[in-house]
Amino acid sequence: MQSDSRPDLRSVFVIGTDTGVGKSLVSAALLRGAVQAGLRAVGMKPVAAGIDPQPDGSLACGDVLTLQAAGNVAADPALVNPFCLPDPLSPHLAAQRAGRRITLAPIVAAHRALCAQADRVIVEGAGGFLVPLDEGDGDPAPGAPLLTGADLAQALGVPLVLVVGLRLGCLNHALLTAEAVRARGLTLAGWVANRIDPAMACADENLDFLRRHIPAPLLADVPHASRWPEGWQPSLFLS
Ligand SMILES: Nc1ncnc2c1ncn2[C@@H]1O[C@H](COP(=O)(O)OP(=O)(O)OP(=O)(O)O)[C@@H](O)[C@H]1O
Ligand SMILES: C[C@H](N)[C@H](N)CCCCCC(=O)O
Ligand SMILES: [Mg+2]
């Protein structure tokens, strides 16, 4: 039972220090943990940029398949992934190429619908926290309105979980992200250290540094695993 001062974790938004740092891996772990606890859990990838060839030869968004496989609610794919963009680019460019504009209203509506269908809704962001989603009407002036992943986080209004991909450069990325989260008045429910680089020098010292300077609890220290052990998952907090 949570006390009133703790964030409501029925839905969390999983953000990362960058693209390719393990947001999908952590989102899937959160979903599996909730499923194992007997809860109805569904993943959401509001904006996916990049359609990948699957082992069976078909084309699909790998992140969406990963989330669907980890959850246990068969939700409408249009709710799980309102924006599915073919090109593996920054979403604002992928959308341009697809002749679309990314807007927040359909995402917020889809999130609300999923929250009505499940006990846990795990939302995976795209790229890093300030990933561009839409550049407005093309006004090239510096400072012209820009829609980013941070705006999406604000619109959803759920607590954030930050995945830090442990590699050289991650300290700066993690501190910048934590600062941007705080500047937006959002809640960082916790962070996950993901050891994506098995050869990283002083990995433990980097992790200790982050533990001292990220203003949220460390939820899991995920080892590097070239082959993921069957059934293994960090013990995260959503159950
Ligand atoms: N702890 C780990 N050990 C080994 N490989 C990992 C680990 N975490 C992630 N990976 C691998 O790194 C790659 C990127 O991980 P993942 O797809 O989860 O990143 P992401 O942050 O979701 O990326 P995107 O921004 O594209 O959504 C994947 O191939 C994944 O299997
Ligand atoms: C294509 C990919 N896998 C990502 N989901 C999108 C990453 C966008 C990064 C944009 C940037 O910050 O430069
Ligand atoms: Mg992903």
Image (cartoon, rainbow, N blue to C red):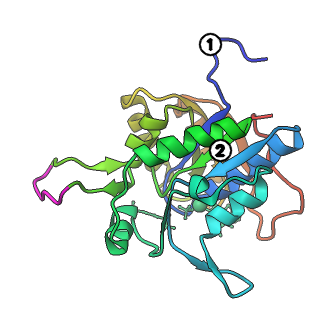
108 up-or-down from 77: above or below: above
9 up-or-down from 75: above or below: above
Give the residue pinned by disc 1: 5
User: What separation in Å lies between label 2 and label 1 (alpha carbons)?
Assistant: 21 Å
Question: Circle 2 — which element?
Answer: strand
29 up-or-down from 38: above or below: below
Disc 2 Cβ-to-ligand 3 distance below 8 Å = no
Specify start and end residues of the magenta stretch as a single range. Answer: 137-142
Query: Which quadrant holds the N terminus?
Result: top right
Work out which residue is located at the far top of the displayed protein and give it.
4
Determine crowd level at label 1: few under 14, some 14-19, many 20+ residues with C-alpha closer than 10 A. few
29 part of magenta stretch: no
Q: Amino acid at mark 2?
A: Ile
The majority secondary structure of the magenta stretch comes to loop
Question: Measured from the top left, where is residue 68 in percent x and y?
Answer: 72, 59
User: Which of label 2 and label 1 is nearer to you?
Assistant: 2
Q: Residue at x 66, y 53 (%)?
A: 194
Q: Amino acid at mark 1?
A: Ser
